[in-house]
Amino acid sequence: MNKIKTLFAIFSLSVVIFSCKDEDEEPKTASSAIISSVSTNVIVATYNDLSTKAASLEASLITLNATTTQSNLEASRQLWKETRQAWEQSEGFLFGPVATEDVDPSIDTWPVNYSDMNHLLDTSAQITPEYLASINQDALRGFHPLEYMLWGQDGNKLASEFTARQKEYMVALGTYIKTRTAHVADRWNANNTDSYNHQFEKAGNGSTVYASRKDALLEVVNAMIGICGEVADGKIEEPFSAQDPTLEESPFSGNSITDFTNNMKSIQNVYTGTYSTDGVGVQDFVKDYNLSLDAEITQKIAAAITALGNVTLPFGQAIIAQPQQILAAQTAIRDLNTTLEGRLLPLIQQKVTD
């Protein structure tokens, strides 16, 4: 019996050791491998997908302009949503050119400014992508004015209701989005010697942006934290606390909950190192040090996605009719944010030394 107890004690101790790795032990996954994989498998892959989808969206809008049928309108709406999916899944890494070159506000500012939009439509100016760039009014360009053109204020616009001027604006918006997203993809293109991809992957080894690999990983984790805060305390909180659907992010298409969900998936993509193909992510670093923390982060990402899925009405309606589901979603996202900020960030700060 004593031998059995001794064997059981040894087994129990081995389980503890396996589950809680010695924090002084060197990690199995090099920080350089994580940075390279997140860059290639997540950031570059997402931006390339976004650029491809934006080009398809522009082509569909040109077709809709030439042949304004309901089926062509539905095709453009679907491509808007597909392009939007890729964009929202890029918001877990809003750093680099998308931030320093103001790409984010230039294509994703809301709410739509009806007064200025109608004024623009009433002018005699030729509405081109170049004109949209020159007016320097973010609320008049990008996803949300285009969303309004495609769905209308009540979300049920008919193809027969388009005016020639609206179609001119619509095509210009599509081309503007394509150009801006292509620019971001190009700025991360590994084939360009001056690309941001090189600055990021060479962190601590010749990068003029990141003096160390720790700096690059902290950038990644802080971006994950940032989108949690933006969704819970901005995108959800502002219309919810005001009980004002006009403050909703994607009201005309009814796409807001999908937007928020894709933001959480963006965090998941960075954490796992995966977009369309599997890779090494922040998760691999966490597993080297703390399996329980990895389980907690994985569970909380899934919980945030599930809580958003429990909102069954369009967001503008749900803030009034489903307040408990909205609160539960906010709580889940804030819980994730707390873990990322309170446990993951310090782990990176303490354990990455190069």
Image (tube, rainbow, N blue to C red):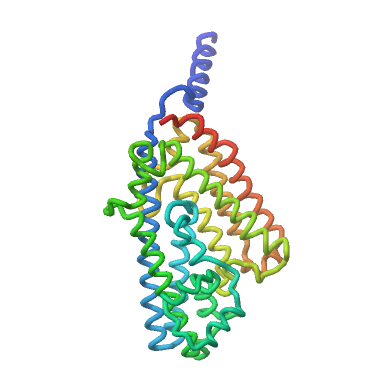
Q: Quadrant of residue 248?
A: bottom right
Give the residue drawn at x 58%, y 73%: 112
Residue 337 or residue 354, whichever sits in front:
354
Q: Quadrant of the N terminus?
A: top right
Picture layout, residue 123 above or below residue 22: below
Q: Quadrant of the C terminus?
A: top left
Q: Quadrant of residue 315?
A: bottom right
Residue 345 or residue 18, whichever sits in front:
345
Left or right? Give the position of 171 relative to 297: left
Q: Which x, y percent locates residue 272?
A: 43, 45
Picture layout, residue 339 above or below residue 167: above
Picture layout, residue 120 above or below residue 324: below
Left or right? Give the position of 244 relative to 38: right
Residue 53 or residue 123, whichever sits in front:
123
**So how many labels did they put on this image?**
0
Q: Which x, y percent locates residue 256?
A: 57, 65
Q: Which x, y percent locates residue 129?
A: 42, 75
Give the residue drawn at x 55%, y 44%: 299
Residue extending farthest to the top is 2
Q: Which x, y percent locates residue 232?
A: 63, 54
Give the residue drawn at x 36%, y 37%: 32
Left or right? Give the position of 244 relative to 286: right
Picture layout, residue 144 above or below residue 69: above
